[in-house]
Image: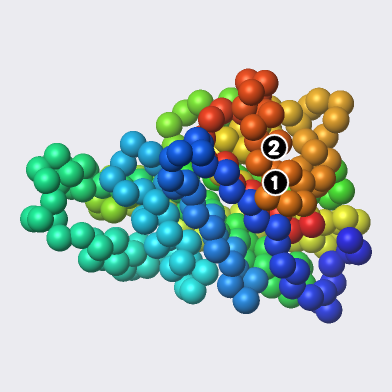
């Protein structure tokens, strides 16, 4: 890939996803818009219908990538319209009331890669690369950070109070660029793959070179299965968006 300039055309990304088990529903979701907006969300399995919540988040972000408190309120309202709470069994009512949880990783690319804005809530990871070198990661920078429980976006507003302490324009955002990079690439991934990548970054063989070779859904699925079997990757829904 040549260094990005203002004349560079938007390239279709490679996007792959593998469920935690073949017989279980994949609760990750991802989407792309024609305007260079990408979104990835990892629904928390322990919560009520997190797959639908993740789909709503990525769909809304690619349509309107301005994450605000009003934006979040509208997303919550859309989710609540999916269910008639009173018609749910009482155990599901309790789960519905507790809320659905998911991460949100959003990327906006403008001016041929001269301006890249990354939004992140939770533990899905964005990675800026130059060739096989990792130049920056957001929001986490070490594998050890994945051991902490992430703060996720919830359909129950009482669980979103952590956002009240944050400045959305600064605390949730990283500003990157492809300028000055010889072989720029941008990767977005959910936490199982993010933990794997950061745990492998100091090995002799770059984890970026490993991911670069994965060009088909089948190749990605085999890679995930092999790393799980070897104990290097945790068993969880695993998704990658790669702009090489």
Question: Would you place residue 75 above or below residue 100 in this image?
Answer: below
Residue 44 position by quadrant: top left
Instruction: From the top left corner, tell me how far across and down residue 242 is, in percent.
Output: 71, 54
Q: Which residue is under mark 2?
A: 222
The answer to whether one can see residue 5 in this image is yes
Q: Which mark is residue 87?
A: none
Q: Residue at x 28, y 45 (%)?
A: 48
Residue 167 position by quadrant: bottom left
In depth, the one of 201 and 231 nearer the eye is 231
Question: Dot 1 surroundings within 10 Å: few (below 14), some, or many (20 or more)?
Answer: few
User: What SS does tag 1 mark?
Assistant: helix
In depth, the one of 85 and 10 nearer the eye is 85
In depth, the one of 195 and 120 nearer the eye is 195
Q: Which residue is under mark 1?
A: 218
Q: Residue at x 15, y 60 (%)?
A: 84
Q: Is residue 141 left or right of residue 133?
A: left
Q: Is residue 116 left or right of residue 120?
A: right
Figure coloring: rainbow
Instruction: From the top left corner, tell me how far across and down residue 182 is, in percent.
Output: 91, 56
In depth, the one of 239 and 206 nearer the eye is 239
Q: Is residue 205 left or right of residue 102?
A: right
């Amino acid at each position: 890939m040549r260094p990005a300039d203002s004349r560079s055309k938007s390239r279709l990304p490679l996007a792959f996803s593998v469920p935690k088990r073949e017989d279980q529903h994949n609760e990750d979701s991802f989407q792309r818009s024609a305007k260079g907006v990408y979104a990835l969300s990892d629904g928390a399995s322990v919560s009520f219908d997190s797959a639908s919540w993740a789909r709503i988040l990525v769909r809304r972000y690619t349509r309107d990538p301005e994450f605000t408190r009003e934006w979040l309120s509208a997303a919550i309202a859309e989710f609540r319209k999916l269910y008639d709470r009173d018609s749910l069994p009482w155990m599901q009512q309790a789960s519905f009331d507790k809320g659905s949880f998911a991460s949100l990783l959003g990327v906006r690319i403008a001016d041929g890669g001269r301006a890249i804005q990354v939004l992140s809530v939770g533990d899905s990871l964005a990675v800026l690369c130059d060739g096989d070198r990792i130049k920056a990661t957001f929001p986490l920078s070490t594998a050890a950070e994945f051991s902490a429980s992430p703060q996720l976006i919830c359909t129950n507003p009482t669980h979103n109070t952590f956002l009240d302490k944050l400045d959305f324009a600064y605390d949730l955002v990283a500003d990157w660029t492809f300028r000055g990079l010889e072989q720029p690439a941008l990767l977005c991934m959910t936490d199982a793959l993010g933990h794997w990548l950061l745990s492998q970054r100091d090995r002799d063989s770059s984890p970026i070179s490993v991911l670069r070779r994965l060009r088909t859904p089948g190749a990605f699925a085999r890679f995930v299965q092999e790393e799980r079997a070897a104990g290097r990757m945790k068993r969880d829904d695993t998704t990658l968006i790669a702009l090489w």
